[in-house]
Structure formats: C-alpha cells, structure tokens
Image: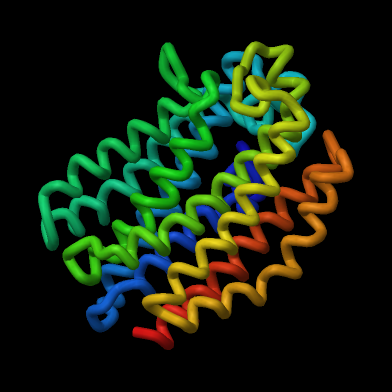
C-alpha cells in the first residue's frame, strides 16, 4: 500500500501557492464585507483542483512515458510508487472534492458557475490527458494564467460581491503572472527530457534562452502591475516589499542554471508568490 507521505509528495505542495494566492487576493479585492464560508469553500475548490491537476499530470505523463527521463521530484506512476489506476482515481477524487463545494457556491450565487467549474475540471484533465493534451502543444502557460489567475482570483471576488469589478480583474493579472512563472520554471527544468519525449511545451517550442527571458519578464510585470492597482487601493504598493525575494530565482535563471539546479528556483518562485500575495492581500484590505 502506498504510504501517505508518497501521496503527499505526489500532490506537489510546492505548487499549492498557485491555488491559495488567487483566492486570497480575489477575496481581498472585494468591496463587500467578508463572507468567510464562501471564501473557505473557494479555497477548498482551488486547492483541490491544483492537487487534482498534479495527480492527473502524474498519471497522463506516466502512462505516456514522458516522465521516464524526468529530473525533478519523483512522480508516482513513473517511479512505480503507485499504479496508474490508483493515481487516476486520486485525480478524480480531488476533482470530486472540488466539485461538491463548487456546486454549492453555484447554487448560492449564479448557475453560470456550473459551466465555469466544468471548464476548470476539463482544463485540468486535458492539460496532459486525453487524445490531444494542450500542455503538449505549448498552451500550458496561457491556461494557467486564465484559470489560476483570472478565473480563480476574479471568481473569488465574485463570490463576495456577486459581480466582477475592474479591481478584481486587475488584481488577478499579477497573480496569474506569478503562477505562470512557476510553470515556466518547471518546463525550463524539464526542457531536455520533454524535447526527447515529444512534449512540445512552450519552453521546448521557443528554446532555452527565450524561456529564461520570459521568466524574468513575467516576474517583472507582476510588480509593474502594482502601479495601476495603487490608483484604486494605494496600499497595494506593499507588495513591492517582496522584490528582494525575486533576486535569487532571477539570478539562477539568468546565470543559466539547469536540471537539478532549477528545483530550488521552483520553491523560491512559490515562496515569492506566497509573500507577494500576502502583502497584496494586506494592501488591498487596508484600502477597502
């Protein structure tokens, strides 16, 4: 029987900031008084979807053999730590856990959230699953920006205000950009293996150097976004205090670190997103 620690490793906690930060920022961008139950359920939906994506990718990449030459942390299927069937079931269970509170939130607000939720689950599975996974075609970064940026963050605002404001969309953009930075780091690390395996991620398509430039640009833009957010909520500028945390990962990327050396960059990018998100939440809350 696969141990709990192995399943936890497969859930890839380093990627969880991509699920936590959008909900926190979107909730803070709301104008209405905090509806704590809705915010909690939104976090459960987002985190369950992130874990489901991780297990789904583990399963799909594992059965395709994409992870056979993988440099990063061990995957469950590729390493033989769990059977493909078990990992697939874990992914579906995570999607189910996301769907249950999602249905409740839809009934409490608008039926349109049924469609949004279905699209989120479909996008999560089809990233590396199905006959034509879009993650193998270079669309992963755009999908992450849309679903773990715009949808998750602005959607969390909607659950509070029951409308989407310009501030909600504006706050969702830098969150989405930092989540994209996480994926760029992951794909840069796996670029050689993905190229051999025929996985045409954006990093494989544009090459090593442009991918590094893209990482720096995405992180820089996330901070530049604070200038327009400050026009509505001046204390949003607090997020600039996270700038020093961007130094080490950017230095590693610019200096040409690759393979195993990029694993700490993934963790550092996740921490950057968490601290940036926390500071932005504080700033948005002060200005509300």
Task: Name which quarter of the figure residue 125 lies in.
Answer: top left
Q: Is residue 34 left or right of residue 218?
A: left
Residue 139 higher or lower than 257, as above or below: above
> How far across and down, in percent of the image, does residue 133 sit?
46, 20
Colouring convention used in this rendered image of the protein? rainbow
Task: Name which quarter of the figure residue 208 lies in.
Answer: top right
- For the point 49% across and 32% down, the residue is 56
Residue 256 higher or lower than 173, as above or below: above
Of 203 and 46, which appears nearest the observer?
203
Q: Is residue 4 visible?
A: no
Residue 44 higher or lower than 52, as above or below: below
- For the point 34% across and 50% down, the residue is 151
> How far across and down, in percent of the image, does residue 87 sit?
52, 31
> How far across and down, in percent of the image, does residue 74 sit?
73, 35
Q: Is residue 109 visible?
A: yes
Of 98 and 159, which appears nearest the observer?
159
Q: How many marks?
A: 0
Q: Is residue 249 left or right of residue 255?
A: left
- For the point 58% across and 30% down, the residue is 58
Q: Quadrant of the N terminus?
A: top right
In the displayed orientation, state which residue is furthest to the bottom.
286
Q: Quadrant of the C terminus?
A: bottom left
- For the point 30% across and 77% down, the residue is 36
Q: Is residue 44 left or right of residue 83?
A: left
Of 138 and 271, which appears nearest the observer?
138
Task: Name which quarter of the figure residue 160 lies in.
Answer: bottom left
> How far across and down, in percent of the image, does residue 248 sit?
82, 58
Q: Is residue 48 left or right of residue 10?
A: left
């Amino acid at each position: 029987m696969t141990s709990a620690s192995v399943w936890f490793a497969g859930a890839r906690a380093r990627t969880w900031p991509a699920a936590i930060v959008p909900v926190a920022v979107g909730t803070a961008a709301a104008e209405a008084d905090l509806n704590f139950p809705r915010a909690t359920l939104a976090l459960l939906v987002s985190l369950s979807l992130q874990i489901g994506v991780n297990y789904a990718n583990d399963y799909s990449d594992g059965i395709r053999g994409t992870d056979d030459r993988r440099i990063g942390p061990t995957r469950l299927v590729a390493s033989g730590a769990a059977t493909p069937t078990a990992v697939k079931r874990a992914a579906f269970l995570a999607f189910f856990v996301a769907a249950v509170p999602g249905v409740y939130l839809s009934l409490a607000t608008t039926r349109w959230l049924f469609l949004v939720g279905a699209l989120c689950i479909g996008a999560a599975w089809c990233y590396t699953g199905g006959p034509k996974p879009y993650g193998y075609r270079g669309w992963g970064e755009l999908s992450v920006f849309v679903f773990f940026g715009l949808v998750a963050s602005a959607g969390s605002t909607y659950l509070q205000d029951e409308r989407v404001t310009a501030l909600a969309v504006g706050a969702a953009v830098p969150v989405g950009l930092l989540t994209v930075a996480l994926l760029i780091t992951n794909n840069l690390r796996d670029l050689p293996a993905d190229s051999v395996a025929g996985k045409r991620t954006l990093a494989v398509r544009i090459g090593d150097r442009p991918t590094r430039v893209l990482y720096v640009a995405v992180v820089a833009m996330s901070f530049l976004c604070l200038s327009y957010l400050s026009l509505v909520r001046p204390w949003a500028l607090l997020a600039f205090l996270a700038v020093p945390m961007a130094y080490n990962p950017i230095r590693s990327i610019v200096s040409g670190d690759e393979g195993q050396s990029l694993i700490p960059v993934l963790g550092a990018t996740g921490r950057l997103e968490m601290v940036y998100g926390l500071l932005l939440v504080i700033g948005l809350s002060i200005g509300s």
